[in-house]
Amino acid sequence: MSKMNPKCALLKRHVFAGGPHIMGVVNVTPDSFSDGGDFLNIDKAIEHGLQLVHDGATILDIGGESTRPGAEVVEVAEEIERIVRVIEGLKGKAPWISVDTRNAKVMEAALKAGANALNDISALTHDSQSIHVAFEAQVPVFLMHMQGNPQSMQKKPHYNNVVEDIYQYLQERISICETHRIDADLLICDPGIGFGKTVEDNLLVLRNISKFHDLGVPVLLGTSRKSFIGKVANDEPVNERIPGSLASALWGLSQGVQIYRVHDVKETVQAFKIYQAISSVEAES
């Protein structure tokens, strides 16, 4: 009898081993690229989060700092003030509440308020203390690839081989997390669509998204309403990119991606249900 691949065995015990899992976006910011200012009010943000859960999200990703290209840095105290009451209001309403932040003190405040996952666009590199917070918390950690930072990332992104470069970076971050005693069955990799990448880079990463399964952890795909969709599809504005968002998510589903960070939860859930129904029906002879 052949032995199970160790990576497959690891993935089967991961908290996000199944899928697909839908991560709904709750931006408590005035300047996020898609819905900046819509949910800066705490009550509106909580209401929005509850609606996303009703629509089918199993993860709520709550952020208080916009990381769109060119976004301004937010003071840590302000970031905490924006998100803590929202997290408190949504605690227990979704299986998973992740905090979308690069800052260790924000992570600590969010975890205390009720968050049970960390989503860091810098893969725990921006703040030297964040990896220690992750170890102490022992919660799922989403590690994303980004070239540069939100202020500079889209100026002149360059790679030798975009897929290989991102793969090696995430492989290294997973290894460093394990060195700091963060179990791999708590880690999730995100190739970072739109973060320091050209349109062609994004398309190449999507085309080769299945390669990231070789890292032995679940893959998160975040394409929702992003600028590459508009650039490919006749410069469509943000609020008219839902069809492109669904198309890219369905491509990810066909490639076995486990987690999807989306703004339009209801539409994504419906699209996935139809895809799965078609995939599971037996073909006529």
Image (cartoon, helix red, strand yellow):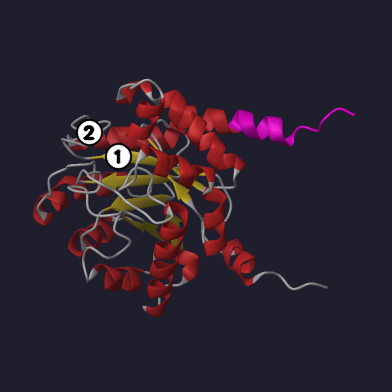
**Whether label 2 touches label 1, CB < 8 Å:** yes
Residue under pointer 2? 39
Q: Amino acid at mark 2?
A: Phe
Q: Identify the mark at residue 18; answer none if there is no mark.
A: none
Quadrant hosting residue 165:
bottom left
Residue at screen point 65% across, 35% down: 276
Q: How many marks?
A: 2
Residue 214: where, in percent of width, then height? 56, 61
Q: Amino acid at mark 1?
A: Val
Mark 2 and mark 1: span between their CA atoms?
7 Å
Label 2: element kind:
loop
The magenta region covers 273-285
Q: Residue furthest right?
A: 285
Residue 233: where, in percent of width, then height? 41, 23
Name the quadrant of the C terminus.
top right
Residue at screen point 41% across, 57% down: 166
Any part of residue 251 in sight: yes
Residue at screen point 81% across, 33% down: 282
Q: Identify the mark at residue 26; answer none if there is no mark.
A: 1
Residue at screen point 58% across, 63% down: 11
